[in-house]
Image (spheres, grey):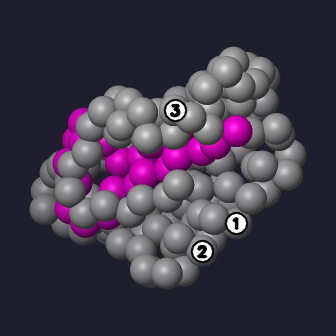
Amino acid sequence: MIKICTSAFEPYKEIEAYQIQQKKSLAGKQGAANVFVGTMRDFNEGEEVKGMTLEHYPGMTEKQLQHVLAEAAEQWPLLDSLVIHRVGDVFPDDVLVLVAVWSAHRGAAFDACRFIMEALKSKVPFWKKEILKDGECRWVDKNTDGYVG
């Protein structure tokens, strides 16, 4: 399932509601769930960021996300997945993205969750305009590498 939302959401409530909804299809099959929750930082590229506007291309974004989830399902034996992404105006500590994956085994759940998140950051059409401490705005040219230690 994929959701793009313009208002704040509670990731753990979303997971709980989704699991209740999917209870029959996951019952007795799931051995692992892996969850990633991404929030907005108050810094980027060495500067303080006080807010951000996330834009997307409706229809294209969801289609690309579906493609990413299909790729993950081809590589790992997934039972289900949930992606929720926020758009619009956001501020430090706001939740931006939730990726949740269910599988029979933890390895598949871990690997698929990371794959989905990294593909989301590099392939899915979201555009970020940051508002810096001094009020200046700038478009984010590239995403942070998810493999930085």
Q: Is residue 146 magenta?
A: no
Q: In what element is the residue under mark 2?
A: helix
In percent of width and height, residue 35 lies at 53, 30
Q: Is residue 59 left or right of residue 30?
A: left
Q: Which mark is residue 63?
A: 2
Q: What is the distance, in whole Å, between disc 1 and disc 3 at their CAs?
A: 25 Å
Q: Is residue 29 left or right of residue 22?
A: right
Using the rendered view, name the quadrant where residue 55 is placed: bottom left
Look at label 3 and name its amino acid.
Lys
Q: What is the distance, in whole Å, between disc 2 and disc 3 at their CAs?
A: 26 Å
Near mark 1 (Cα within 10 A), the count class, few <14, some 14-19 or many ≥20, is some
How many numbered tags mark residues here? 3
For residue 60, say whether it is visible. Answer: yes
Near mark 2 (Cα within 10 A), the count class, few <14, some 14-19 or many ≥20, is few
Decide: is 20 above or below 94: above
For image coordinates 70% across by 66% down, the residue present is 67
Kindly report the secondary structure that dominates the magenta region of the rendered protein. strand
Q: In what element is the residue under mark 3?
A: helix
Q: In what element is the residue under mark 1?
A: helix
Considering the image in quadrants, where does the C terminus appear?
Answer: top right
Q: Is residue 104 left or right of residue 135?
A: right
| Front one among 147 and 85 | 85
| Front one among 60 and 123 | 60
Q: Which mark is residue 23?
A: 3
Look at label 2 and name its amino acid.
Lys
Q: Nearer the viewer, mark 1 or mark 3?
A: 3
Asked if the residue at tag 2 contacts the one at tag 1, i.e. Cβ–Cβ closer than 8 Å, the answer is yes
| Residue hosting label 1 | 67
